[in-house]
Image: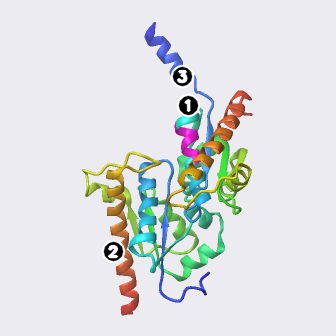
Amino acid sequence: MQESQQVSSQSVEKPKVAIIACAGMDKALGSVARTTAFIVTEKLRPDNTLLVCIPPLVADVKPNAELIKKYPVVTIDGCAERCATKIVAKAGARIRGRIFVPQSAQTYNLKPNTASDIGQEGEKLAEKIAEETAVLVSKLCEGGLK
Amino acid sequence: MIMALSKDKVGIICCSGEEFPEGTISRVATRLVLEKLKPDETVTLCLPLFLAGGEDERAFARVFPTIAVDGCSKKCAELGTTKFSGKPVATIVVSEIMKNHPELKAKSREKLDAQEMQLAMKVAEEIEKKVDEVLCKKVNK
């Protein structure tokens, strides 16, 4: 009985959303994007999300390219270049949500320190954006990920 | 951007991969080089921007030597740089350096503990060595 329950829970795949953050090296808001992605995928929605690296999508590394075609994608961009969105769109993903960190920074009036150390305000900003992203993930999962 | 640089610089392009702790080590090590070990000799190129088509980043990598810092054996930073600008003069792979320091583990993708910072410093020192080699070669040419 126990064994069959285990097998059945394993065979039903939970709905997943791929989270792709810019993680830009140059800007503090890029580091906030990266931190946000970690909070969503590790703390707020670990069962319904997967974190996908950007570079392999362009470097033609297969598993990553397949993942973003299989699952709906939410991008988190740290600056106006919107590299995460551009790269993911070019790679043929289904983008279902876009988070723009500079806009959230204005909305919440929080300013991160530097790219190396986003500081308390940066951490707080990442948490706020992560909460918004988590809500978006839930909506996407409830909506059947169409 | 290039016109404003009056002396030799080396571009550091790190993978900053989010999927593995080694990606975070590559990122922190790169920042250690830029901010502490070689602030006057190095600049960083944002890999996502580079890959998305950032012409300034790509032009820099065509003119100046670059060092790729990759977290894992996929070597995305090296592959991406080669694809759009030219092969980096050197590639540092964190997972390879870790083989020489089995006592140091990479566990976290977000914040590094003291042991992980030690590992990041080891990687940073390897990058620093490569920067010195590259600049020395340029001077001797």
In the rendered image, residues at marks 3 and 1 fall on the same chain? yes
| Picture layout, residue B138 above or below residue A47 | below
Q: Mark 3 and mark 2, same subunit?
A: no
Q: Which residue is mark 2?
A: B129
- Tell me where residue A67 appears, x and y as whole percent: 59, 43
Magenta stretch bounds:
A36-42
Left or right: residue B15 versus residue B135 is right
Q: Where residue B136 sits in the image (x, y, percent)?
A: 36, 86
Which residue matches tag 3? A11
Query: Chain ID for label 3?
Result: A
Q: Position of residue B57 (x, y in %)?
A: 60, 73
| Residue A49 appears left or right of A96 | left
State yes or no: discs 2 and 1 in contact (Cβ < 8 Å): no
Q: Is residue A62 magenta?
A: no
Q: Secondary structure at mark 1?
A: loop
Q: Is residue A137 above or below residue A59?
A: above
The residue nearer to you, when weighing A10 against B134, is B134
Say left or right for A126 vs B26.
Answer: right
Which amino acid does the dot numbered 2 rest on?
A: Lys
Q: Amino acid at mark 3?
A: Ser
State how far apart marks 3 and 1 are (Cα).
Answer: 14 Å
- Asked if the stretch drawn in magenta spans residue A39, the answer is yes
Determine crowd level at label 1: few under 14, some 14-19, many 20+ residues with C-alpha closer than 10 A.
some
Distance Cα–Cα, label 2 vs label 1: 42 Å
Residue furthest to the bottom? B141
Q: Is A8 on the left-hand or right-hand side of B90?
A: right
Q: Which residue is mark 1?
A: A47
Which numbered disc, 3 or 2, marks the residue closer to the eye? 2
